[in-house]
Amino acid sequence: MEFCDDCGSMMKTDGDEWVCGACGATTSRGEDESEFVSTDSQADEEVIETEENASFEGKPTTTDVHCDECGTEKAWYYIQQTASADEPPTRFFKCTECGKKWRGYN
């Protein structure tokens, strides 16, 4: 596995180069890559969306929340580390009924 020197994201192989899927940076592949393993694809259920307009549908749900908009107690969520590593992660929610989005801090 190779990581981008510019942004830290995982790089993928493309011919004789490593290419960063996040920022597009490239670097030459070395001669001795016996310890590297390349993957061509990733299953959709393994991808965690972190973009502002990410689709929540199909993500895990929880019933330990309360939507202030419609009162529903079920929401999709994902977890993202938004502060330093010694801080707890932030949970992002989307109401399954009205679509309202909010954050939860542990």
Image (spheres, rainbow, N blue to C red):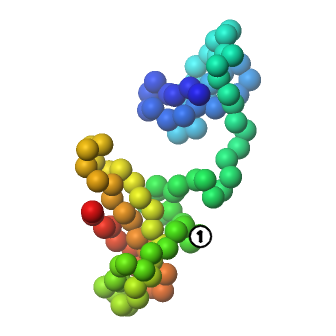
Q: Residue at x 58, y 31 (%)?
A: 11
Q: Judge left or right: residue 53 versus residue 69.
A: right
Name the residue rendered at 51%, 57% in the picture: 49
Q: Quadrant of the C terminus?
A: bottom left
Q: Is residue 31 left or right of residue 6?
A: right
Please tell me which residue lies in front, 58 or 62: 62
Residue 103 drawn at (x, y percent): 32, 67
Looking at this view, name the residue that lies furthest to the top. Answer: 31
Lateral position of residue 9 relative to residue 29, left or right: left
Q: Quadrant of residue 101?
A: bottom left
Amino acid at pointer 1? Gly
Q: Is residue 21 visible?
A: yes
Task: Return the x and y of residue 91 as percentages of the image width and height.
Answer: 37, 63
Write the residue at 35% across / 83% down.
67
Q: Is residue 85 above or below residue 89?
A: above
- The quarter holding residue 66 reads bottom left
User: x%, y% of residue 27?
Assistant: 58, 19
Relative to 53, residue 80 above or below: above
Q: Count how many numbered circles sit on residues in the image.
A: 1
The residue beneath circle 1 is 58
Q: Secondary structure at mark 1?
A: loop
Which image quadrant is residue 36 in? top right
Residue 102 against residue 44 in the figure, above or below: below
Query: Which is more toward the observer, 67 or 98?
Result: 67
Q: Position of residue 53 (x, y in %)?
A: 48, 63
Q: Quadrant of the N terminus?
A: top right
Dot 1, crowdedness within 10 Å: few (<14), some or many (≥20)? few
Task: Report if residue 95 is visible in the image.
Answer: no
